[in-house]
Structure formats: C-alpha cells, structure tokens
Image (cartoon, grey):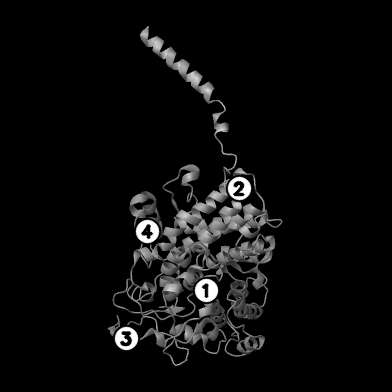
Amino acid sequence: MKKLFITILALSFAFVSCEFDKGFEEMNVNPAKANQIDVGNKFAWTALQTSGGRYENWRNSLIYNSVLIQHFASTAGYWSGDKYYRVNSYATSLWDRNYPSCVKGIEDIIDQLNSEGNTGTEMGMARILRVFIYHRITDTHGDIPYSEAGKGYIDGTLKPKYDAQQDIYMDMLSELEGAVGQISGDSSMGNSDVIFGGNATKWKAWGNSMMLRLAMRMTKADAASAQAWAVKAISAGTMTSNDHIAMIAHTDGPEGINKNGHGEVFQVDSNARMSKTMEMHLTGDPRMDVLFEPGSASGGVQAGLPNGSSGSDYTDLDGNTVPGVATRHAYSAVASALQGRDVPMVFQTYAEVEFLKAEAAIRGWTSGSAETHYNNGVTAAMKMLKQIYPATTAITDAEISAFLAGPGKLAASFPANWEMVMNEYWKATVLNEYEAYANWRRTGYPTLTPTKHPNGETNGQIMRRMIYPGGEASTNAENYAAAVARQGADDWMTRMWWDK
C-alpha cells in the first residue's frame, strides 16, 4: 500500500510538472535572436573556407603541388615536393582543413535549403560549390568520404564510408547537370556570394564548365563517358569570357580567412622561385615579366632555378653531382603583384575552358576548330592576368598576336598540337596548383624531368597522389581498409581511378 501511494504521488507530480511545462519551450525563446543562421552568411563562410587559409595553401598547394609540377622550385628543405620528401602533415593538410570546415559547411547549407523548401537558384549554387569542394579532395587523394561525409550533426554519421572515385565522378557530373537546371533567376544572396555576386548566368556557365573539366579528367579511365559528358557540357553552355572566371574575392583583413591564402604565405615565405622548366616555357612569352621578377642578386636577369637544387652539393640517385646554390636570390621570384592578400583566389578560368574545348576538337569529339579554341585560350590567359592581379602591366594585343604567330603558333597535327594545348593549360594554371597537378597527372604535359634526391620518398618519381591522414587507419579503420583494398596501397605512387 505504501509503495502504491508513493507511485501515485510521483505520477501526480509528473502530471503537474508536464502541465506546468506546457508552453515553456515557446516562452524560452529569445525574440531578438535568430534560431537559424541565414544561408547567405553560411555560404560566404563556406566559400572562403574552400578558398583556404595560409595553412593548407602553404603546405599542399605550394610546398607540394606547385613544385611537383615545376611551376616553382625551392632550395629550402621543407619545400618537400621539390625533392619528393615525405611530410605527412603537409600532404594531408587539404583533407585536414576541408572536412571540418567547407565540407561540413556545404552539407549544412544543403540540409537547411532542403528544410526551407528552397529548390531553386540557391540550391543549384550550393550543389555546384559542393562538387567543387569534393572534386578537389578526390583529385588529391583518390577514394574519399563523399556520400556520407560532413553529416555528423545532420544524421549522426561519424565514420563515413570512402566512396570509389569512379562513383564519385559519376555522381558529381549528375549533380552538376541537376544543379544547373535548378538555377533560374539571380540569387537573393547578393554580396554573400563572394564568387559571382548571385549572377545566375555566371553560375550556370561555371556549372557546365566544371562538367567539362570533370569529363576531360576521365579521358584515360573512361573515354566514352568522358566524350558524352564533354559534349553535353559544351552544348549546355560554358564560360564565354574572362568575366565568367570563377574566383573568390579577398580583402586584406580583418580576419585571416578573408585574406588570400597564397598571399599570406608569400608574406612570410620568400623561398618560391621560378623553376628552370617554367623559364624554358616562358621564353618568348610576354607573361614572363608579369608572373615573375628578377631576383635581387640576379643582375636584373630572369632566371629559373632547377628543381631539385639545394644549398650544397649532393649526389643524386643516378650518381650525378647536383651543384649547390649559393643564394636563391640569383633566381626569379613570384611577381609582387601576384603576392597580394587582397587578390582573388582562382577556381576555374575561361582560358582553361577554351583549352579543354581545343582538346575535345583535337579528339574529334566536336566540330569546333582546335586552333580557334587554342588561340582564344592563350588570349584569355594573357588578358586575365590584369583582371585577377590589377597591379600587373596589361599584355597588349600586339604582344599576343606576335606570340601566336611565333613560338605560340599551334602545331598542325597530333600529338604535337595536343601537347601545346596542355602546355598552355599548365602555364594558365599558375597559382591554381591543385588543378595544375591534376591535369599534369592526366595528360603527362608538360614533359617534366623528375628530381633525383637520395632522400626522396619515391625513388626519383613524381608523386601521383597525397596520402590519407594517419588517424584514418584507427578512427575510421573499417572504411579506410576498404578504400585501400579497392584503390591500392596508401602511398604516394598509387594511381587513382582516372590516372590509371
């Protein structure tokens, strides 16, 4: 009886408590505070995170990518990519920064747009940015968390599976097609869209241009699908001028993420020098004096530093003596105008699109003129430098015409014409180092001579991918193991799906 009384009393208090709490949730809301952050604010933050800060732009974009594909060279030992040294934290810096920031951010944006019933322009923009984010990570590492990534707060997935790169590519292409179809009028985000200011025409052009880039990335792995998607992208309407360049606007503050990440690196690290390979390719090219400036100890002469150089002599893997370099200042530095923290960070350019169209024409996939697209690409690549880096000197029409009639005249037949197109693509992607590295692995152009330092990780071969973060093998062991079993050993020379 006593137990029954206690139970009834407890239930009575519970019912009273429930009745007392009725409406309390509504009462306990601050009317002056939003219960959800506006999508526009989230979009601006996520786009800036995608552009990246000093950390990953220093370690992955510059210290590895830029010297692996020999835009730059460096004698500094910590510029690991120049001599193929192993520094795990540098190689994984894009992954380490992107998954907690822009991956998480874009998945949250799409989830919010879905909950708000927004299936129009803003959703299309978000899906295109999402593809760009993942495409850069998969091109760096291969198989990656994709379909289940960034959703820990959304559905509780804390150990996402690694999707096969082939499946990722097929989905990204479909996503781009669907996203472009959702974009109608200009976005209400306005200046919160730090890429295009909400301009629907430019977003659609970028979505289709990204589709063309991804399609052409598959040429070695699946030529039939590459052709089908490339033709679809071109037919749908890609970038048509330098006004369509996809780039992130930056300012010199007040916070670090507002600044150009490369500019932040150049502020504290002057070790990057024009490579000897780049000097050879820029001979007779008016971009030489726009992209680079003579070193302080060079006597005013533009000079490229051979990749693999060090501060002292060493014997390379072939038994040859590589002479030491007394001072890096005898070699050309990145031009001051390109080093600003307030210059844009480029994602994709109209010049790149024209070069890809030239390649499609060379392959016989389109009826367009390869030479016309090539000339358009070279012209756009030269003219865009003044637009992206306002402090530079504009290249004149006469200089462009002289180059196209001289050393830059397109060869008449394959494979020389394709090599020239891809060499120009390489030059047009200076400081777009993720893309430059990916396209070189796909095409093999320009022809690069690997460095042969005895302490390199790859026995004198240019690295084909960046390794996975070490913690993945323990914190996400089952999914990591499945990816390695499918793709191959988690090392620097394992080729990803589109590179096989």
Badge 3 density bin: few <14, some 14–19, many ≥20, Cα 10 Å: some
Q: Is residue 322 above or below residue 118?
A: below
Going 45% across and 45% down the picture, which residue do you hit? 157
In space, the residues marked 3 and 4 are separated at their CA atoms by: 34 Å
First-in-chain label (4 vs 1): 1
First-in-chain label (2 vs 3): 2
Please say if the residues under marks 2 and 3 sit with CB atoms less than 8 Å apart: no
Please say if the residues under marks 1 and 3 sit with CB atoms less than 8 Å apart: no
- Comparing 444 with 453, the one in front is 453
First-in-chain label (1 vs 3): 3
Q: Is residue 226 above or below residue 312?
A: above
Left or right: residue 266 compared with residue 383: left
Residue 113: image tag:
2
Please say if the residues under marks 4 and 1 sit with CB atoms less than 8 Å apart: no
Q: Which residue is mark 1?
A: 340
Q: Is residue 23 above or below residue 351?
A: above
Report the amino acid beneath label 1: Gly
Asked if residue 172 can be seen in this view, the reply is no
Badge 2 density bin: few <14, some 14–19, many ≥20, Cα 10 Å: some
> Among all residues in the image, which is located at the extreme right?
185
Badge 4 density bin: few <14, some 14–19, many ≥20, Cα 10 Å: some
Report the amino acid beneath label 3: Gly
Q: Position of residue 219 (x, y in %)?
A: 53, 68
Asked if residue 462 can be seen in this view, the reply is yes
Q: Which residue is mark 4?
A: 469
Q: Position of residue 487 (x, y in %)?
A: 41, 59
Q: Which residue is mark 3?
A: 324
In space, the residues marked 2 and 3 are separated at their CA atoms by: 57 Å
Quadrant housing the C terminus: bottom left
